[in-house]
Amino acid sequence: MAKRALYVTLLRRAGGPVLSVVLLCLALWALHAMASEVTYRQIAGYVHALPNTDIALAVLLTAAGYVVMTLYDWFGLASIGRRLPARRVGLISFISYAFSNALGMSLLVSGSIRYRFYVQAGLSTGEVARVVLYTTLSFWLGLAALTGVTLLLVPIPPDVPLSGLRIPLAIVLALVPLAWFGVAVAVRRPVRVWRWAVNTPTPAVAMRQILTGALDWGLAAGVLYVLMPEAISGGFGHFLAIFVVAQMAGLISHVPGGLGVFEAVMLAGFGATGNHGLEAPILGSLAAFRLVYYLLPLCVATVMVIWREVRALRHAALVTPWFSSLLPPFFAGLTLVCGAVLLFSGATLAIPGRMEILRGFVPLPLVEVSHFLSSVVGMLLLILARGLQRRLDAAYVLTLVLLILGAILSLLKGIDYEEATLLSLLALALAPAHRHFYRRASLFRASFSPGWVLAIGAVLACSTWLVFFSFKHVEYSNNLWWEFSFHHGGAPRALRALVGATAVVMLVALANLIRPARPRRAYPGEADLARAMPLLKHFDSAQAHLALVGDKMLMFAPGDQAFIMYDIEGRSWVAMGDPVGTDEAARRELVWSFRESCERAGGWPIFYQVRPADLDLYLDVGMNLLKIGEEARVRLETFNLDGKSKKTLRGTVNKLSRDGLRMEIVPAEAVPALMPKLKCVSDAWMRDKKVREKRFSLGLFDERYLARTPMAVVWQGDELVAFANVFVTATKEEASVDLMRHLPEGPSGIMDFLFIELMVWAKAEGYRWFNLGMAPLSGLQNRRTAPLWSRFGAMVFGRGERFYNFRGLHRYKDKFDPEWEPRYIAVPGGIALPLALANVASLISGGIGGVVRR
């Protein structure tokens, strides 16, 4: 069973990327077959011969298209009643779409970029989800509307994929936006789905979504149409039919940017409409379209980043946190593009005129070495892009060096000043950004997600195809590998460069394969707890003492400057609370290390009960945040029993004091002597309550654990009637309790007495806060505009008393007049949230059985 589960996990993680690479290879094979008579020189010649007016019009339409794309976000924010500065929304929209259009939605995940930006702008997680849902719906509704109408009106050639299903497909696609608009017109109130109310759009909002998406796709088609050769037959209608089918095929393939798939369908479509002999111009127009619509916006975005970074050197306040958080993934994406440019350049034929100029002052060996090394540098940039996304300092330094080296090599191998300029621009933008790459972790510990594996595999597959396509007129022989020449050395150089790039990939893959296996569970011993003790004593949250229970594994930062306590349930690696320590850099690095350890083991990193002050630690690594409740903290400076609201508590304390109850604080070293009496109280309490011990976020009766902290005990005469172990910080910031037990036959109100006496004692000792612990699901809203998770949690809080005393616990803590502070759970994007929450509940309850019984 274990092997079967492993195979299922591997299939789930690698199946999608492998399928996408297979589809890409099939598309490249089909493209190679359809363009068998076309040479690389013909394609390059068409691109160079494009009229300046056509290029200018294509650029203008591209600019208009990206302006329309900003409407996705603008209207999405308006749909939830939020307004943000137009310049800020435009910038984030432009950057996210420049990435997603060029590299694919799955690579840098523009939704993740939006999430970090909008959360820092004050939106809740639910509001961000609604904006992303709005933009995604608009994108697909527009494509469905444009494709459906076009296919209904214009026939497509029989050789185009899905041509036999044109009418059924057109009807289905056209009905999607019509149905959406129909729902908006007919349904004027929220739709009940079980116990939730789902808001429907107004007719104006639905129409705006459809028209914005259709206009976006129409402008993209217009960019390619003006670059197409004038000799193509069929007019714009036939062109649009083929274009939308090709775009849909590219999106379905999940290949980044639809690279290869889009081109293959376009060439098949035009080849079937009588445009024989135009294969080279059509491929040339597709190449120009990639440059204008995809690469040009990335270059513009690079210039914008350079401008902001240069200004930031003079005015530090200009770089706002929301913009700074975008820079690492932004630079990672551009580095990926630059690596692909170097690999594609190394796989194609150099311009003869430039080689003739180069021959006059650069020796042939230097040209050969430069060509080979430029492809190696390109592949290294693809790999280092992952390190930049992870904010690794070593990746930053190596990328900067390789960008400069790549620019020099581009000039030496063929005076390719275009790619040298691109690499130099990125190096200039990256140079002042060192502060954003602060992690000192090893490059060899970085894991590669399926999306990154797909991107690197796609670039390598395209490079391989380009080598065989560019030099298909050259007959292969073994001697080809050893030919060195200015005029006839293009094919040998490309083959050697391809082997060099492939060797780099294989070495990196081998290094990942021979990494240490997933570590076994190792719960802390006395030595580990001794390492943790100084950190938790000086941490500002007393709840860090839960590490002393010993039921959670500890992950330490280098130098023991911070630690994370966690346990594993299913695929969930659940950390209890925030990283413990006072060194902020060590805590931040530990969050990254924990996430990477989880990814290497195929797990989900989850941080449970994190505080508002540390939310940026999880936003930086791209995690999502959900409110799970509120923690009650009493400000001891103002705590007293005066006033009418404290009359009941005051009466309870006075009565029990007259009955002979007294509290004593027993130091940790004296607790073992009391252990037999403590156990009698605990056993009686457990029998009376008919409950089982909890764990993870709560302590349990364990003699070794209880002997590590002071103990508050309540005596009635010589009889011990109640106890609670006490958490205190050396900084006097906070005091708290964990395990609380009392005799069932003890006097009524004994726990109120214990809490009041503890607060009085803590106030006298100079502590600032007394922590009463968390009230789960407290503070979540059940309003119509609230996020789905918040409404679900509020419903459980109000109606789930049969499973857990949610309201009663909140009311009990509230009578001490605490200040309620929200607590969150940080989860990675894209996981099944219910399963993750079930894993957390199972950890706390001591197994899945404890979730359903007390």
Image (cartoon, helix red, strand yellow):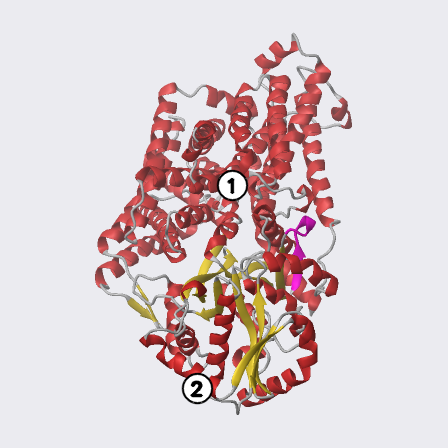
Residue 539 visible in the displayed image: yes
Q: What's the distance in space between the residues labelled 2 and 1, CA to CA?
A: 63 Å
Indicate which disc residue 155 carries: none
Per the image, the residue denoted by label 2 is 655
Using a 10 Å C-alpha cutoff, classify the residue at mark 1 as few (fewer than 14 neighbours), some (14 to 19) or many (20 or more): many
Residue 287 x %, y %: 48, 30
x then y, percent, for residue 68: 32, 39
Task: Identify residue type, mark 2.
Answer: Lys
Please tell me how crowded label 2 is: few (under 14), some (14-19), or many (20+) other residues with Cα within 10 Å.
some
* 466 left or right, relative to 509: left
Residue at image mark 1: 329
Q: Which residues are magenta?
A: 553-561
Depth order, front residue of 15/233? 15
* Residue depicted at 52% across the width and 80% down the height: 852
Q: Nearer the viewer, residue 375 or 473?
A: 375
Q: How many marks?
A: 2
